[in-house]
């Protein structure tokens, strides 16, 4: 029996099933609405860190980055859904610009202008190719990256980004030191976004709930428009058609960028494995096959490398779309293919990117406060799976202390070589390295070696388990 006119339950669990076109098109666009803002935000953040975009003469380069974020997220999604040889899982996997690489990219471009993007381009290409090369081995590497490690890394990504969210909500880095920074108006506009987003997320269902951040940003945009905070000059100057430009920013292969992107590529590959497993479990009620995991990892890395050639940022599978498949119950890869085509079409129209670039930074700040907080929450959720014995507490504590400490006090590395500073100041790479090494080589604890007892007067509802995480 057909469900809501889409097909039978068995058909909806089949990735190769094509629902009726009239139903498939809105379902595909729904996938894009769920990831749209998250997909273009990294480009805005990196451009802002470098010092171009948002009212600067370099706004044209920001528009280009936004367009490439859409274009190559769509192309990378097609690699996953349609596939080509060993590339692609042939599953409804939505690819988008990765937040995970932002803490690594910011030190590479900080205050150096659009010229610094050549270094990022080189890193994205090499990191993507390395990521693709992990495909045959990724299943065997998972033992080295248990929830203790992956949860710590995701948590640190979120903690590294929350400062950006607060700065944006207060008025942006260029406004620091001015009377306008942190003004009541700035915070009011950002708060409108947060309140509307949370209201929709928790008190509505369906598309309204799924697109809560997008609608929240629209609400904040309207408020900013009323207060005269929006300028449409960039829209008027933007063209209607944009063809991707190979090596738009040039290319420069530096040791720090290549190593940083390659190491983060390992984390991104593990994230993709988790998303593939989540899609097959939530949409088809089965485990992912080895071929699907290999194909997804190959497409993840290859898509990033191709994007890098055209000045875009690294791509990865988007977890929010995994949840959307579980909600809709539609496992069709063809639905996601329709969404990818829609995204590519948007990517060829610079007017769309120019409109996005008119979003006041305070409005974006309200949205990213929610997004970055959710990244940190996802890390905490992963860590909830850890067996918190003394051994794992020590590993987590040492790695977190070093990683978060370097984020908070980058000046501690002022005497280190510039390449070392770039690799370590994000805190992610040293924390991940410490956690992986300690988890592999520290001896396991005894069965009765439990976590320290809590102070007297604090009730312990249950003993913490002591089995090591690997």
Image (spheres, helix red, strand yellow):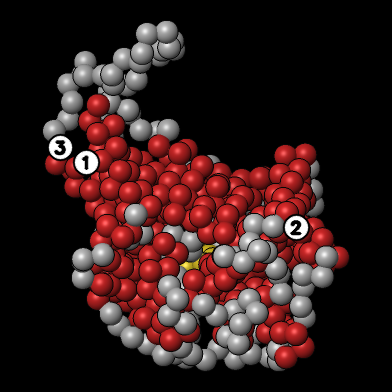
* Alpha-carbon span between mark 3 and mark 2: 52 Å
Q: Are marks 2 and 1 in contact (CB under 8 Å)?
A: no
- x%, y% of residue 339? 66, 68
Q: Is residue 189 above or below residue 277?
A: below
Q: Quadrant of the N terminus?
A: top right
* Alpha-carbon span between mark 2 and mark 1: 48 Å
Q: Which residue is mark 3?
A: 442
Quarter residue 48 falls in: bottom right
- Counting other residues with Cα less than 10 Å from the Cα at mark 3, is it few (<14), some (14-19), or many (20 or more)? few
Q: Are marks 3 and 1 in contact (CB under 8 Å)?
A: yes
Indicate the secondary structure of the residue bearing disc 2. helix
- x%, y% of residue 271? 42, 54
- x%, y% of residue 313? 47, 73
Query: In the visual, does 279 lie left or right of 107?
Result: right
Quarter residue 93 falls in: bottom right
Q: Which residue is mark 2?
A: 185
Q: Residue reaching furthest right?
A: 226
Quarter residue 454 falls in: top left
Query: In the visual, does 360 lie left or right of 68?
Result: right
Indicate the secondary structure of the residue bearing disc 1. helix
Residue at screen point 69% across, 57% down? 183
Q: Which residue is mark 1?
A: 439
**Nearer the observer, 236 or 145:** 236
**Nearer the observer, 260 or 337:** 260
**Nearer the observer, 268 or 20:** 268
Q: Are marks 3 and 2 in contact (CB under 8 Å)?
A: no
Q: Is residue 85 at least partly visible in the picture?
A: no
Q: Is residue 309 above or below residue 98?
A: below
* Alpha-carbon span between mark 3 and mark 1: 6 Å
């Amino acid at each position: 029996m057909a469900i809501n006119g889409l097909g039978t339950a068995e058909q909806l669990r089949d990735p190769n099933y094509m629902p009726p076109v009239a139903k498939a098109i809105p379902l595909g666009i729904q996938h894009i609405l769920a990831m749209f803002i998250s997909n273009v935000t990294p480009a805005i953040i990196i451009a802002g860190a470098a010092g171009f975009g948002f009212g600067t003469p370099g706004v044209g380069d920001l528009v280009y980055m936004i367009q490439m974020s859409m274009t190559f997220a769509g192309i990378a999604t097609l690699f996953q859904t349609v596939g080509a040889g060993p590339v692609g899982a042939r599953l409804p996997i939505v690819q988008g610009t990765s937040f995970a690489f932002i803490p690594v990219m910011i030190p590479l471009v900080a205050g150096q202008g659009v010229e610094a993007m050549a270094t990022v381009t080189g890193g994205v290409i090499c990191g993507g190719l390395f990521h693709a090369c992990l495909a045959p081995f990724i299943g065997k590497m998972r033992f080295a990256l248990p929830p203790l490690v992956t949860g710590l890394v995701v948590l640190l990504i979120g903690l590294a980004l929350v400062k950006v969210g607060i700065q944006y909500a207060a008025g942006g880095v260029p406004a620091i030191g001015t009377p306008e920074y942190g003004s009541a108006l700035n915070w009011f506009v950002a708060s409108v976004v947060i309140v509307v987003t949370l209201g929709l997320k928790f008190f509505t269902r369906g598309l309204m709930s799924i697109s809560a951040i997008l609608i929240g940003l629209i609400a904040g945009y309207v408020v900013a428009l009323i207060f005269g905070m929006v300028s449409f000059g960039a829209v008027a100057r933007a063209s209607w058609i944009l063809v991707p430009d190979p090596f738009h920013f040039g290319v420069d292969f530096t040791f720090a960028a290549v190593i940083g992107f390659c190491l983060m590529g390992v984390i991104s590959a593990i994230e993709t494995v988790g998303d593939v497993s989540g899609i097959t479990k939530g949409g088809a009620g089965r485990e992912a096959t080895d071929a699907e995991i290999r194909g997804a990892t190959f497409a993840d890395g290859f898509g990033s490398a191709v994007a890098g050639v055209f000045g875009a940022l690294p791509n990865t599978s988007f977890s929010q779309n995994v949840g959307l498949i579980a909600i809709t119950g539609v496992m069709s890869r063809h639905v996601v293919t329709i969404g990818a085509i829609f995204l590519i079409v948007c990517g060829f129209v610079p007017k769309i990117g120019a409109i996005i670039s008119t979003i006041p930074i305070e409005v974006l700040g309200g949205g990213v406060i929610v997004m970055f907080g959710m990244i940190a929450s996802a890390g905490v959720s992963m860590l909830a799976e850890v067996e918190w014995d003394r051994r794992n507490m020590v590993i987590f504590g040492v790695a977190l202390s070093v990683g978060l400490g370097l984020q908070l006090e980058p000046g501690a590395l002022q005497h280190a070589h510039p390449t070392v500073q770039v690799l370590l100041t994000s805190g992610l790479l040293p924390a991940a390295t410490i956690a992986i090494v300690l988890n592999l080589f520290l001896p396991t604890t005894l069965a009765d070696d439990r976590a320290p007892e809590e102070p007297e007067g604090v009730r312990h509802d249950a003993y913490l388990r002591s089995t090591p995480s690997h």
